[in-house]
Amino acid sequence: MLKYSTQVVLCLFIVLSACEPNVNESLEPVPTTPTDIPSGNGSNPPDASIETDSTIILALAKINALRQKGCDCGNQSMLATSSVTWNTKLYAAALAHAKDMHLNSYFSHTSPSGENIYHRLIKAGYISTTSAVLTYGENIAFGKFDLETAIQKWLESPSHCANIMRDSYKEMAIAHDGNYWVQVFGAQRE
């Protein structure tokens, strides 16, 4: 019951958390300067049974408009960068994490069983090994709000905003379950 009460308090304060892209849990280094990266497998919008087309269009429009004009993320000025495309495998990873946090009543990038974004991307089929991915990142949020508000909350946080603006990302997805929001970014090697 204490765990549930803590979540109610956290909801009132709208807890946000961001992780740095590709914390590199593996032993293989990941290049920091991307080269010509195609959008990768699974970049087509998912069926309406997964997410509605209008939600995908809205999410991409909001994020890409920001990426194309650049913005200030706290004290850091972020230059304009390329658009991202929707990726169904990133969506599967985001939705799985949102559902897991909701079902197990926690709010973290790492599940109680120790799984993190790297493990979720493997399970979703986005990557098979560390050498298959150039970079990835994740934003999470907790609160009773809609898609536009979730994006706005991330933009108000310098670390979340910087994650959204990272120029090495080529694909993204956003999912939520209950009050748990997850945004996942990535770029695969071909």
Image (cartoon, rainbow, N blue to C red):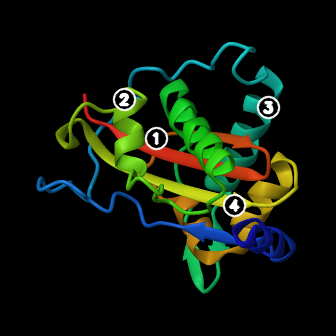
The residue at which mark 2 appears reads as: 38
Tell me which numbered mark, 1 or 4, is placed earlier along the sequence: 4
What residue lies at 74% left-to-right and 61% top-to-bottom? Answer: 142
Rate crowding at label 1 as few (under 14), some (14 to 19) or many (20 or more) other CA atoms within 10 Å.
many
The residue at which mark 3 appears reads as: 55
The residue at which mark 1 appears reads as: 170
Tell me which numbered mark, 4 or 2, is placed earlier along the sequence: 2
Residue 84 shows up from this direction: no
The kind of residue tagged 3 is: Thr
Q: Residue furthest front?
A: 1
Check disc 4 and report its element: helix, strand or loop.
strand
Q: Which mark is residue 64?
A: none
Q: CA distance from mark 3 to mark 1?
A: 19 Å
Please name whichever residue, 10 or 33, is drawn nearer the observer in this view of the structure.
Answer: 10
Dot 3 and dot 4 residues touching (CB under 8 Å): no
Dot 2 and dot 1 residues touching (CB under 8 Å): yes
